[in-house]
Structures are given as structure tokens and as C-alpha cells.
Amino acid sequence: MTTPPVLRDDDVEVSHPHGDPGARDSSPQLWLLRILSALIIPAVLALFFFTFEFLQDPETNKIVQITVAIVVGVGGVWLLYWALDRLVNAMPDRVGAGVRPFVFAGPALILLAFYLIYPTIDTVITSLRDAGGDEWVGIDNFVRVFTENTYLISLRNSIFWAILVPIVCVGVGLAVAVLADLLPRRTESTFKSLIFLPMAVSFVGASVVFAFIYSFRVEGFGDQIGLLNAIWTAFGGDPVDWLRVPFWNNLFLMVILIWTQTGFAMVILSAAIKGVPEDLLEAARIDGANEWQAFRRITVPTIASTIVVVWTTILITTWKVYDIVAVMTGGRDGTSVVAERMVTEFFTFQNNGVGAALAVVLLVVVTPILVINIRRFRQQEALR
């Protein structure tokens, strides 16, 4: 006769008849407790900020500043979370389950709202005021942005960047990913690493590199050290100031962003290509399809969601590009873009109204792209 197994408490999964014991409890008292628990850490951080005001004094000893910042900033926050976790554990199960998410995620959401939502609202309000932010001018700043030639050039260039750069990056990245997939594994890894390497370089660093490539010196003021001019003059041409050639100077600046972003597109698309079922490709080949037809009819439709995600990600990066234009030309000679013009209006001309209006334009254009990206990402995750 066998003895029935003894079940320990941790062997039995006890499920609440209504799911999460705290999920359906929406009493006002519990919601008040949730809100208070989410506000505790931001309130204590604000108290620390005003209590340790001496840390903002440039006369304070740097070692003291660093020590207090580490002890209070790191140790203090850890201690707060530890204490709140102990407090939640002491609550009844139903109340604790309803409060715990607000204890850990609530402070982050509140700080996110403070540092993102509040500045967004403030920027919109500033865009409706004059240069000094004193008087209401309504939509006058937006009228200037969409009618004056200076800002129209910036808008035109940004649209040009947003169309061309993502197409080239995704196209070249996809081509390189397909070709790299045909290489032996070790060679493929080395090849991909070299293509991806520019992604590790900042936009400022990449601009400095290309500043030497596009370098130009007037005849009589030294040798031409720019790589592009060296090649051009080797074939008998005269030195050219590439960054002052109308229209083409914008293309030369776009090359920098394409150089840094193509590796990103290549890596993501390569991973997607490796996820295409091999049996589908074999079936297409058996049916008489060549490699191009199999790629166009099987591979591309299968990775379409990934292509859209990569395209929208690079599009957002392109639309808000600032560093490259600021370092290379400062927006001169018809190379200004919206983000660069926004910073110039804010910090050079002290025109807060127009600067905020340009920021709002950036936000309005980027928001729907972000929504598309998030939806595509969720669709992609649902298929996995």
C-alpha cells in the first residue's frame, strides 16, 4: 500500500477566485494609499534637494559634495525602497497586492511626468508668448515659422533629411545584411562588426572625422589635407569647399548620419532575416523561384514589421538631428535644420517664443511616428 505524497505549502499554487487579490479593490481608501505610496519617494527626494542646498554652492568642497551625493542619493533611495517594501509586506494581502506596484513603479511615473509632461506643457505655453516670454502673441510664432524664409529653409531641409536618410540607411543596411548572411560565420561576424562600428561613435565625433574628409583650404594657405579634395585634385580638379556648395552640402552632411546609422539597420535586419523559416525559402526554390524572387516574395514580407520599426527609429533620429549640422556648418549656407534652428533661436538669439514653436513642431511630427513604432513593435511581439 502506497502512502499518498505529502504536499507542502510551496508545492501548491493557490489562486484567488477573482485573480489578483488587489486588482478589483478600487475603494477610495485603497486608491488614497496607492497615491500616497507613490508620492513618498519623490517627496523625500524633494526634501533632500532643499535640505542639502549647500551642495549647489560652488564654494563647497567637491569631496564633501560627492560623498553626500553617493550616501544620500544611492544609499538613501535604497533605504527608502527597502523600508516601503517592509511596510507593504506588513499589510494585509489584499491591500499589499494593490499597493505594491504603486510603491515601486509610482515614483518613476511621477518623476517621468514631472520631467517630461510638465516641460512639454511649459514649451507649448512659451510658444504662444513673445521672445522674452512676457506677453501673449497667440499663434504669431507659428505663423513666422511657416512663412519666413529662414525657417522654411530649415523645414525644407529637415523634410529632405527625413525622406532620404532612412531610405538609404534601411536600403543599404538590408543589402549588407543579406550579403553578410552568405559569408562564413567567422567572416560574417568580423564584417558586421566593422559595419556596426560607426554606431559607437557620437555624432560630434563622426562630424569631426568628416570635417577632415571635407576639409578645404584656399590656394596659397597650405596643402589640401581633406581626403575628398585630395582625390578630386589628383584627377586634375580644383579644390572645392564642399560644405558651401548649394544643395550638395546638405547631402554631404547626410552622409555622416547614414554612416553612423547603417550599422544599426544592418544588425536588426540581419537578425530578422535569420528568423525567416528556411522551409519557406526551400519550398520557393523547389517551385522554381530564383534567389531574387525568394527574397522579394518570402524574405521581405516576413521581415516587413522589422523594416518598418527600423525605418521609423532612424526617421525619428533624423528629424531631431542637431549635432552634425551644428559642428559642421552651424546652419550656414542653407544647411539649417529644425532642431539646429530651435537651439539657435533659444540660446543665440534669445527668442524663446520662436524656439518653443520649433520645438512644438518637432514634437507634433515625432509623436505619430512614435505611435506607429509602438504599434508595430507590439504586433511583432505578438507574433513571437
Image (cartoon, rainbow, N blue to C red):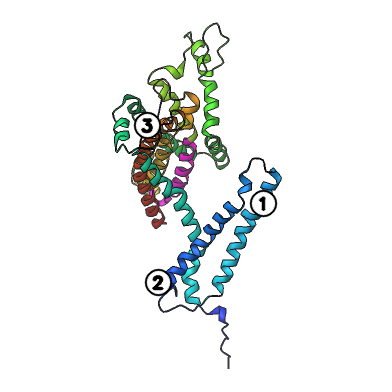
Residue at screen point 37% across, 21% down: 247
Q: Going by the image, does 55 lie left or right of 371?
A: right
Q: Residues within 10 Å of mark 3 (few under 14, many from 20)?
A: many
Kind of residue indicated by mark 2: Pro
Q: Earlier in the sequence, mark 3 or mark 2?
A: 2
Quarter-wise, where is residue 87 in the image? Answer: bottom right
Residue farthest toward the bottom in the current orientation of the protein: 1
Reply yes or no: does residue 265 show up in magenta: yes
User: Magenta residues?
Assistant: 261-280
Of residues 78 and 258, which is closer to you in this image? Answer: 78
Residue 285 in view (yes/no): no
Q: Which residue is mark 1?
A: 68
Q: Residues within 10 Å of mark 2 (few under 14, many from 20)?
A: few
* Coordinates of residue 224 in the picture (x, y in percent): 55, 13
- Circle 2 SS class: helix
Q: Which residue is mark 2?
A: 28
Kind of residue indicated by mark 3: Ser
CA gap, disc 3 and disc 2: 49 Å
* Coordinates of residue 145 in the picture (x, y in percent): 32, 31
Q: Which residue is mark 3?
A: 158
- Circle 1 SS class: helix
Quarter-wise, where is residue 359 in the image? Answer: top left
